Image: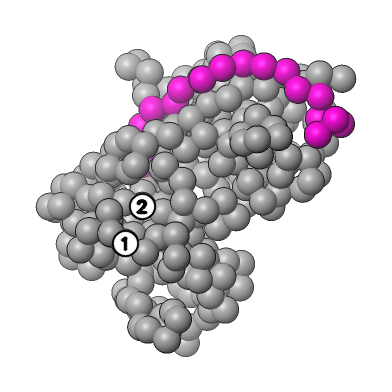
């Protein structure tokens, strides 16, 4: 049976979005990999599935699958596309919704200018919460990568991030070093590897190698993690423009114990149908 889908992107981070509210949709890792394939499927960084909530107080359940077929906890760019999708499909009339994720509740809000703001939650720093193997919490940790020491900030935005400061993102070893950081043994659930260039206290440039996907044009949770890491290291102010390969996100964080707020675009590229059982 043909299943409708929307192809969407947030600052170039692209998604196939499926409505599992109107009809049940069963996704297997092999179907997800084929759907995400840019030659044999629709093509995307992640597949997003909208479902009915399973917890009280939520409007929807939000499930995120990386291109390798694995389900993950959080995706900030996807969250913005999520609220645009449920509004466009008339699944809700609300401008702000409560969304259940594996990482907990998030609250994306559709703005009057068409952008979307997301409360991404409170960042967590304890190694066990990331998870990350370390004897105690620190602002910066040293990782051994291919025989060399790399300094990273480690935190969870509902999903794990390792952020390093680099002189120039254009020459950073994102696609060679990134996979080694992603699968470093100190990260038992793997990690997203961020490369941050400080332009000034209110502007950074960022590239992210995402676990299970590779480098993407934008990573919303990675942008939040980078700003938090920069703030923790005394390098950034509380409101920062994050320039990624696919566009700019606006991130603000008041400090420890407070949620991170992210604002950016959510765009529908095209609509279609696909027969999942033929993938």
Stretch in magenta: 261-279
Of residues 196 and 138, the one nearer the viewer is 196
Query: Which scheme is used to colour this image of the protein?
Result: one colour
Provide the residue designation for mark 2: 207
Residue 268 sits inside the magenta stretch: yes
Residue 121 sits inside the magenta stretch: no
Rendered location of residue 269, percent (x, y): 51, 20
Q: Residue at x 74, y 27 (%)?
A: 20
Total number of numbered labels?
A: 2
| SS at badge 2 | strand
Contact, CB < 8 Å: mark 1 with mark 2? yes
- Left or right of 106 on screen, residue 89: right
Rendered location of residue 174, percent (x, y): 40, 60
Of residues 91 and 248, the one nearer the viewer is 248
Provide the residue designation for mark 1: 172
| Mark toward the viewer: 1 or 2 | 1
Of residues 170 and 58, the one nearer the viewer is 170
Q: Residues within 10 Å of mark 2 (few under 14, many from 20)?
A: many
CA separation in Å, label 1 and label 2: 9 Å
Rendered location of residue 88, percent (x, y): 56, 14
């Amino acid at each position: 049976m043909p299943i409708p889908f929307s192809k969407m992107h947030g600052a170039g981070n692209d998604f196939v979005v499926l409505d599992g509210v109107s009809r049940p949709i069963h996704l297997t890792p092999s179907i997800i990999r084929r759907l995400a394939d840019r030659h044999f499927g629709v093509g995307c960084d992640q597949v997003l599935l909208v479902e009915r909530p399973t917890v009280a107080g939520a409007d929807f359940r939000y499930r995120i699958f990386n291109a390798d077929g694995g389900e993950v906890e959080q995706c900030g760019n996807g969250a913005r596309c999520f609220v645009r999708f449920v509004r466009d499909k008339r699944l809700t009339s609300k401008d702000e919704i409560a969304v259940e994720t594996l990482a907990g509740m998030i609250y994306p809000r559709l703005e009057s200018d068409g952008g979307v703001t997301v409360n991404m939650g409170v960042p967590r720093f304890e190694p066990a919460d990331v998870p990350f193997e370390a004897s105690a919490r620190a602002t910066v940790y040293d990782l051994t990568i291919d025989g060399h020491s790399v300094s990273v900030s480690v935190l969870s935005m509902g999903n794990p991030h390792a952020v390093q400061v680099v002189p120039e993102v254009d020459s950073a070893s994102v696609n060679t070093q990134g996979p080694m950081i992603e699968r470093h043994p100190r990260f038992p659930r793997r990690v997203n590897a961020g490369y941050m260039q400080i332009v000034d206290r209110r502007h950074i440039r960022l590239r992210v190698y995402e676990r299970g996907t590779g480098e993407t044009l934008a990573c919303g949770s990675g942008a939040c993690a980078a700003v938090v890491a920069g703030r923790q290291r005394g390098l950034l102010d509380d409101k920062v423009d994050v320039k990624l390969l696919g566009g700019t996100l606006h991130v603000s964080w008041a400090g420890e114990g407070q949620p991170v707020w992210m604002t950016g675009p959510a765009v529908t590229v095209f609509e279609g149908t696909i027969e999942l059982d033929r993938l």
